[in-house]
């Protein structure tokens, strides 16, 4: 089964084609066009600007890489949420038009589920059930127990800022700009992780929730009145390294604690922050000490991409695929919750092909 994926939830315009068979899925090709340079001048993503760029880029990608009749494509998967409403709408309406014109099933995919299914890309099969997913992105920090395809159970989440947001805000504090995550990581590489003794919020509490607003505030007040030191060699590097160390320690310790309590043997790292090399290394180290396997998405599929959406679409086709007039009812949901991923599922499934029924 070959699935076309479309992703436009934020500032990446992406399309990809994947092929699935049984419990294996492999990317055939994947194309991503980032708008990061465009939005850096605003200090963050502007939804209306992102949507206009998606319209132009996505139309060009469709013309360049897809045949007019959809030959070689069995279904179309698209991100319906969460994300920026104007940006999501461009992808969803494009996908609906293609599915309608090609007479192919449309599979609405939750963006966060897509990040989890990026773990299936690799040489072996995907993670064994059940597993724990540490979902870390710009707007989400969650611990998700995954018992089967589409069976997501939230065990913990941030009570305030997501860790990705915290990275972006610390980057802004020290003048690194947008996107903040990779810039903080780059500067932290040569910094001293012990230069600043910042808190590890909620790390010892008897739950699986997170909180990063206190860490962010601690950084803010530590830097207040010290702006003249930003030009001192090593100052920003030490700030980034100390902050990153605190955030990563909380994520890793909470995840290991949750995995051991749930008795799972595998942890999946998912979301844009999964591209952070320090987080990948520390999670692998600590889980290894605890006898837990870690599944890391290939680096190129950690950030927003359409391959992960197509992979999720392949595995969730039986539950979520819609055809015929039901296509018209598929809508964007900017605040979509992973645990309501079937919100776009329709009762009208009589036209589903055999591969989506078996």
Image (spheres, rainbow, N blue to C red):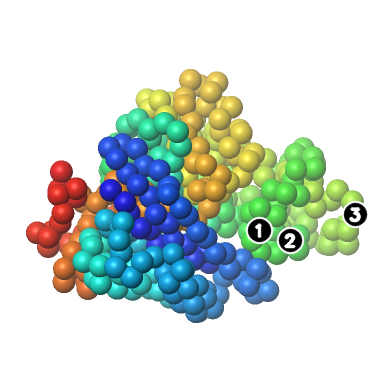
Q: Which residue does the image show at 38% across and 58% down from the upper left?
A: 5
Q: Earlier in the sequence, mark 3 or mark 2?
A: 2
Local SS, label 1: helix
Q: Which residue does the image show at 16% across and 68% down from the upper left?
A: 324
| Crowd around label 3: few <14 · some 14–19 · many ≥20 (10 Å) | few
* Horizontal side, residue 68 vs residue 189: left or right: left
* Horizontal side, residue 184 vs residue 116: left or right: right
Res 160 visible: no
Vertically, is 159 above or below 119? below
Residue on which disc 1 sits: 180
Local SS, label 2: loop
Res 265 visible: yes
Q: Name the spot of residue 237 as percent of width and height, x first.
A: 79, 48
Q: Name the spot of residue 272 as percent of width and height, x first.
A: 53, 51
- Inter-mark Cα distance, 3 to 2: 15 Å
Vertically, is 137 above or below 249? below
Camera-nearest residue between 294 and 240:
294
Q: Name the spot of residue 283 as percent of width and height, x first.
A: 56, 33
* Horizontal side, residue 220 vs residue 209: left or right: right
Local SS, label 3: loop
Residue on which disc 2 sits: 176
- Residue 232's tag is 3
| Crowd around label 1: few <14 · some 14–19 · many ≥20 (10 Å) | many
Q: Are marks 1 and 2 in contact (CB under 8 Å)?
A: yes
């Amino acid at each position: 089964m070959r699935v076309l994926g479309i992703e436009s939830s934020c500032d990446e315009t992406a399309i990809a084609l994947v092929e699935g068979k049984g419990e294996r899925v492999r990317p055939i090709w994947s194309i991503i066009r980032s708008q990061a340079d465009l939005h850096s001048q605003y200090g963050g993503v502007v939804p209306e600007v992102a949507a206009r760029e998606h319209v132009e880029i996505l139309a060009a990608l469709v013309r360049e890489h897809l045949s007019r009749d959809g030959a070689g494509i069995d279904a179309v998967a698209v991100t319906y949420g969460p994300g920026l409403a104007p940006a999501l709408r461009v992808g969803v309406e494009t996908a609906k038009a293609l599915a309608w014109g090609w007479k192919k099933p449309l599979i609405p995919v939750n963006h966060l589920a897509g990040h989890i299914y990026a773990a299936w890309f690799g040489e072996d099969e995907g993670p064994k059930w059940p597993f724990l997913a540490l979902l870390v992105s710009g707007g989400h920090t969650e611990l998700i127990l995954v018992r089967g395809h589409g069976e997501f159970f939230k065990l913990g989440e941030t009570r305030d800022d997501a860790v990705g947001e915290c990275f972006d805000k610390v980057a802004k504090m020290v003048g690194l700009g947008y996107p903040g995550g990779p810039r903080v990581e780059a500067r932290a590489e040569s910094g001293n992780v012990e230069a600043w003794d910042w808190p590890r919020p909620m790390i010892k509490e008897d739950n699986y929730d997170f909180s990063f607003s206190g860490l962010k505030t601690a950084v803010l007040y530590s830097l207040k009145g010290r702006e003249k030191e930003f030009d001192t060699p090593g100052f920003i590097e030490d700030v980034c390294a100390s902050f990153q160390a605190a955030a990563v320690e909380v994520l890793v310790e909470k995840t290991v604690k949750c995995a051991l309590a749930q008795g799972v043997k595998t942890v999946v790292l998912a979301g844009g922050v999964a591209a952070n090399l320090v987080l990948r290394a520390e999670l692998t180290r600590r889980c290894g000490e605890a006898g837990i396997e870690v599944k890391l998405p290939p680096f190129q599929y950690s950030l927003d991409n359409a391959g992960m959406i197509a992979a999720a679409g392949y595995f969730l086709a039986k539950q979520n695929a819609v055809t015929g007039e039901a296509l018209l009812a598929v809508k964007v949901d900017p605040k979509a919750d992973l645990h309501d991923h079937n919100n776009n599922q329709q009762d009208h499934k009589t036209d589903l092909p055999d591969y989506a029924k078996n």
